[in-house]
Image (tube, coloured by chain):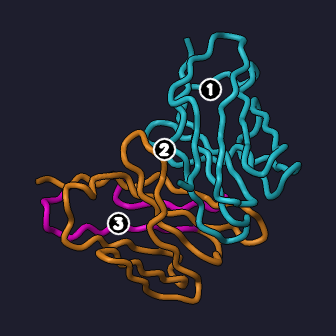
């Protein structure tokens, strides 16, 4: 069953803690993306990766880090430097980065304790 | 920065009616996409229209693109309660690998 999965569905972060959101795809897509969505808002790009071992900052990368060691995996770490991390985080993938349909995971909701 | 802006922000209609939502953007594009998001879920791709296309259909969906006005519209015909969702347009930024998403139209279809 092909698709893109995210875990966990809900994540709680304590002050000063780093947390990592998982994103996995078995679509054999080269490109992967992380977006942040705040209530009633559109999506803002955090990071994207065109290919394994390469990634680029999006519009709001501060306080976040990523890695792309495997084609199917693109984890996002929300660091303690991100002062307002409460949001809905969406991972997406596409065949390539240029002009292609993006397929989204179900999202992870991050809440601060 | 380039951004799609949807209009209206919210729309409430009766089942069976048509729903029209609009998207405007600021700079030239290669293509524009429409996505649907059910509450608390990921986005689902609906349709992609390229800059050299003027209209595209998919089932009950009709998308138009007017590059001279930098605008697009999404028409959902014979709406159903299951169409209740937020609808986003996304425009590519030529020369980059980014899509810019608008803030969405929240559609509510009343049974």
Q: Of A49 and B28, which appears nearest the observer?
A: A49
Image location of residue A1, percent across then percent down:
53, 54
Asked which quadrant contains residue A110, the reply is top right
The answer to whether B78 appears left or right of A31 in the picture is left
At horizontal 46% and vertical 57% (from top left) the residue drawn is B44
Q: Which residues are magenta?
A: B1-25
Residue matched to label 2: A41
At horizontal 75% and vertical 39% (from top left) the residue drawn is A61
Pointer 2 indicates a residue of which chain? Answer: A
Q: Residues within 10 Å of mark 1 (few under 14, many from 20)?
A: many
Q: Quadrant of the C terminus of chain A?
A: top right
Q: Colour of chain B?
A: orange
State how far apart marks 3 and 1 are (Cα): 31 Å
State how far apart marks 1 and 2 are (Cα): 15 Å
Image location of residue B42, percent across then percent down:
48, 47
Asked which quadrant contains residue A37, the reply is top right
Q: Of A24 and B17, which appears nearest the observer?
A: A24
Determine which of the numbered discs, if any, sits on residue A85 in the image. 1
State how far apart marks 2 and 3 are (Cα): 16 Å
Q: Which chain is cyan?
A: A
At horizontal 54% and vertical 31% (from top left) the residue drawn is A87
Residue matched to label 3: B21
């Amino acid at each position: 069953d092909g698709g893109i999965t995210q875990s966990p569905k809900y994540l709680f972060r304590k002050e000063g803690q780093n947390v990592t959101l998982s994103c996995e795809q078995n679509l054999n897509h080269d490109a992967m993306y992380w977006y942040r969505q705040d209530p009633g808002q559109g999506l803002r790009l955090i990071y994207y990766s065109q290919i394994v071992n390469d990634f680029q900052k999006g519009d709001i990368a501060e306080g976040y880090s990523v890695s792309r060691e495997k084609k199917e995996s693109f984890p996002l770490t929300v660091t303690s430097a991100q002062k307002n991390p409460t949001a809905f985080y969406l991972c997406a993938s596409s065949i390539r980065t240029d002009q292609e349909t993006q397929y989204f995971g179900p999202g992870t909701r991050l809440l601060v304790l | 920065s380039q951004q799609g802006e949807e209009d209206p922000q919210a729309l409430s209609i009766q089942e069976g009616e048509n729903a029209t939502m609009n998207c405007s953007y600021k700079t030239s594009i290669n293509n524009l996409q429409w996505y649907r998001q059910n509450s608390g879920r990921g986005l689902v791709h609906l349709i992609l229209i390229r800059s050299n296309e003027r209209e595209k259909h998919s089932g009950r969906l009709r998308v138009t693109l007017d590059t001279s006005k930098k605008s697009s519209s999404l028409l959902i015909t014979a709406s159903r309660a299951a169409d209740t969702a937020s609808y986003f347009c996304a425009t590519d930024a030529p020369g980059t690998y980014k899509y810019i998403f608008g803030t969405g139209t929240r559609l509510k279809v009343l049974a």
